[in-house]
Image: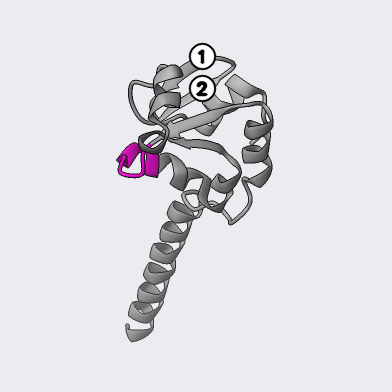
Amino acid sequence: MKTIKKVSLILGVLIVIGIAYSSISGYFVKPNSLDDFAKCLAIKGATMYGAEWCGHCKEQKAMFGESFKYVNYVECPESQVLCEQMGIKGYPTWVINGVNYPGTQTFERLKELTGCSV
């Protein structure tokens, strides 16, 4: 009877670990795995306009992780005139091929708009 309880406990723990791993492994992006995508966005002229205090901007940046350093980014509170000229009304806003796309954009959407591969 004790052996069955031990086996059940071990299986239960392994199942919980497996579920936890599979849940979070898709959430976290490996460092620098998005470098090429971010660089492609920059080459295509895609630019994200935002503000340091903006929660949605922080989420968008976090999606890229360390690779965000390659994204064209304008901090609007520091570049008010430029942001006004670009018609930025809220944050974040992506400008791609002269068109404004307000709000957080998925990688799939950015891929559609630019042709860059994720």
Residue tagged 1 = 99
Residue at the spot 58% in from the left edge and 27% down from the top edge: 46
Q: Are marks 2 and 1 in contact (CB under 8 Å)?
A: yes
Binning the other alpha carbons within 10 Å of mark 1 as few (below 14), some (14 to 19) or many (20 upward) gives few
With 117 as the anchor, is 27 left or right in this view?
A: left
Residue 96's x, y, as percent? Answer: 56, 20
On the rendered image, what quadrant is the C terminus found in?
top right
Q: Find the residue positioned furthest to the front.
A: 81
Colour basis: one colour
**Helix, strand or loop at disc 2?**
strand
In the image, residue 109 lies in the stretch drawn in magenta: no
**Helix, strand or loop at disc 1?**
strand
Residue at the spot 37% in from the left edge and 78% down from the top edge: 4
Q: CA distance from mark 2 to mark 1?
A: 5 Å
Q: Based on the displayed image, in which of its 4 quarters is residue 10 positioned?
A: bottom left
Amino acid, disc 1:
Val
Between 27 and 47, which is closer to the camera in this rendering? Answer: 47
In the image, residue 56 lies in the stretch drawn in magenta: yes
On the rendered image, what quadrant is the N terminus found in?
bottom left
Residue tagged 2 = 95
Residue at the spot 33% in from the left edge and 25% down from the top edge: 90
Residue 54 disc label: none
With 56 as the anchor, is 98 left or right in this view?
A: right
Amino acid, disc 2:
Val
Magenta stretch in the rendered image? 51-58
Binning the other alpha carbons within 10 Å of mark 2 as few (below 14), some (14 to 19) or many (20 upward) gives some
Q: Is residue 25 above or below residue 38?
A: below
Residue 64's x, y, as percent? Answer: 52, 45
Residue at the spot 39% in from the left edge and 38% down from the top edge: 78
Residue 27's x, y, as percent? Answer: 46, 49
Between 118 and 22, which is closer to the camera in this rendering? Answer: 118
